[in-house]
Image (cartoon, grey):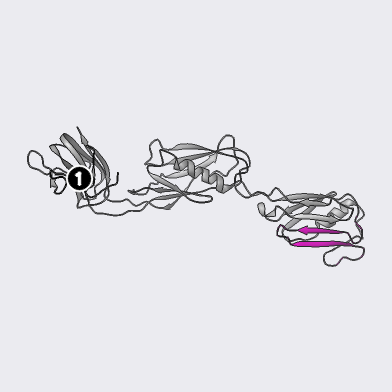
């Protein structure tokens, strides 16, 4: 039910509402009899009065007790009343009003580390003058090296000392190509993308001649944060304003899911939490997860925290034990929970 709705009537004999300004509560139809008004929270020097209308809600007057005292609350408490059929509302006046600010807590997910794309090229013979080797990037940029009988010039490899496949592999590994690195072990050349991640997938190494395998294509590059093995991420939320805090939610994840995918799974599970939803909205994009306090706002909750850890089985993420208070909460005033109930 929206707070402080001017003269809006609901067909109930009871009312529960949060007061956050100097205004009137929702109007209820009272069918006569005994009732209780109770309120608790931050009154901010405000006064809450029970008011009644017997003309269908056109004119409201202050309800009074048997000694003709206006029924009011200025601090946590309650009072009883007895009145015939009418419309009832609570009026708040004199409070120092402050809009406040929503507390925002931010968690940044990470891990596992990125993996560079790799491939191997096996040399099984000796090249002859005019044989070549090509290195082609995923963008189609090609670097060509040619074997020559004499002294090597630019983009050439001398055959003078290449008397075994192992020496040929070492000569190939010694050439410089931007975007990849090469190492040799015996007759096998290992080519690795210089930058870890998926960008190195698709580099191609091709040979022309009868001295080595025809082609090797780099693969296996994995972006940072990609789940290595299917498992469970445990998300633990702590807050002074959440019942049964801290509590832990299990989020299943699967091998190959990228960081933005499994972080979005965490956002979904938090959004659907019946414990969290009444107090916080869940947001963020990519690796970022945020909790934002719903109105009315409260003073900063120093205990608020979101943590993630590997569950069983472990998907290999980077555990984060402490989230960041990116925006401090400032209390809305007044902030009073009001109840008008039949006895």
Which residue appears farthest toward the top when viewing the image? 343
Magenta region: 126-153
Report whether residue 233 is seen: yes
Q: Can residue 145 be found in the magenta stretch?
A: yes
Q: Is residue 246 left or right of residue 13?
A: right
Q: Quadrant of residue 227?
A: top right
Q: Is residue 93 left or right of residue 324?
A: left
Q: In the rendering, at what x and y percent does residue 29 appear?
A: 20, 40
Which residue appears farthest toward the front when viewing the image? 56
The quadrant of the image that shows the N terminus is top left
Report whether residue 196 is seen: no
Q: How many marks?
A: 1
Q: Can residue 143 be found in the magenta stretch?
A: yes
Q: In the rendering, at what x and y percent does residue 146 appear?
A: 86, 62
Which residue appears farthest toward the bottom when viewing the image? 153
Q: Residue at x 45, y 43 (%)?
A: 271
The quadrant of the image that shows the C terminus is top left
Task: Please give the residue where the numbered disc 1 appears in the rendered image.
Answer: 90
Q: In the rendering, at what x and y percent does residue 70 appear?
A: 12, 44
């Amino acid at each position: 039910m929206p707070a402080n709705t001017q003269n809006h009537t609901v067909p109930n004999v009871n009312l529960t509402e949060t007061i956050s300004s100097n205004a009137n509560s929702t109007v209820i139809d009272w069918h006569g009899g005994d009732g209780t008004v109770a309120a608790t929270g931050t009154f901010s020097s405000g006064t809450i009065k029970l008011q009644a209308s017997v003309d269908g809600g056109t004119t409201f007057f202050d309800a009074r007790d048997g000694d003709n005292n206006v029924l009011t609350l200025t601090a946590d408490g309650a009072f009883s009343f007895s009145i015939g059929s009418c419309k009832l509302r609570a009026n708040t006046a004199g409070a120092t009003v402050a809009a406040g600010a929503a507390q925002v807590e931010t968690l940044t997910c990470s891990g596992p580390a990125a993996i560079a794309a790799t491939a191997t090229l096996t040399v099984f013979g000796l090249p002859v003058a005019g044989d070549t080797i090509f290195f082609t990037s995923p963008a189609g940029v090609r670097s060509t090296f040619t074997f020559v009988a004499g002294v090597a010039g630019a983009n050439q490899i001398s055959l003078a000392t290449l008397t075994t496949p192992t020496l040929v592999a070492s000569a190939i590994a010694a050439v410089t190509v931007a975007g990849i690195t090469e190492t040799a072990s015996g007759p096998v050349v290992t080519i690795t993308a210089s930058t870890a991640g998926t960008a190195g997938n698709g580099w191609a190494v091709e040979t022309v001649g009868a001295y080595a395998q025809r082609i090797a294509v780099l693969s296996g590059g994995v972006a940072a944060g990609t789940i290595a093995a299917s498992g469970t991420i445990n998300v633990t939320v702590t807050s002074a304003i959440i019942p049964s805090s801290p509590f832990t939610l299990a989020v299943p994840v699967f091998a190959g899911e990228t960081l933005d995918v499994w972080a979005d799974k965490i956002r979904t599970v938090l959004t659907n939490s019946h414990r969290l939803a009444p107090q916080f909205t869940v947001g963020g994009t990519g690796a970022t997860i945020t909790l934002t306090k719903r109105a009315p706002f409260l003073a900063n909750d120093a205990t608020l925290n979101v943590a993630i850890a590997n569950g069983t089985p472990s998907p290999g993420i980077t555990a984060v034990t402490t989230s960041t208070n990116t925006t401090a909460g400032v209390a809305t005033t007044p902030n009073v929970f009001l109840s008008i109930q039949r006895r």
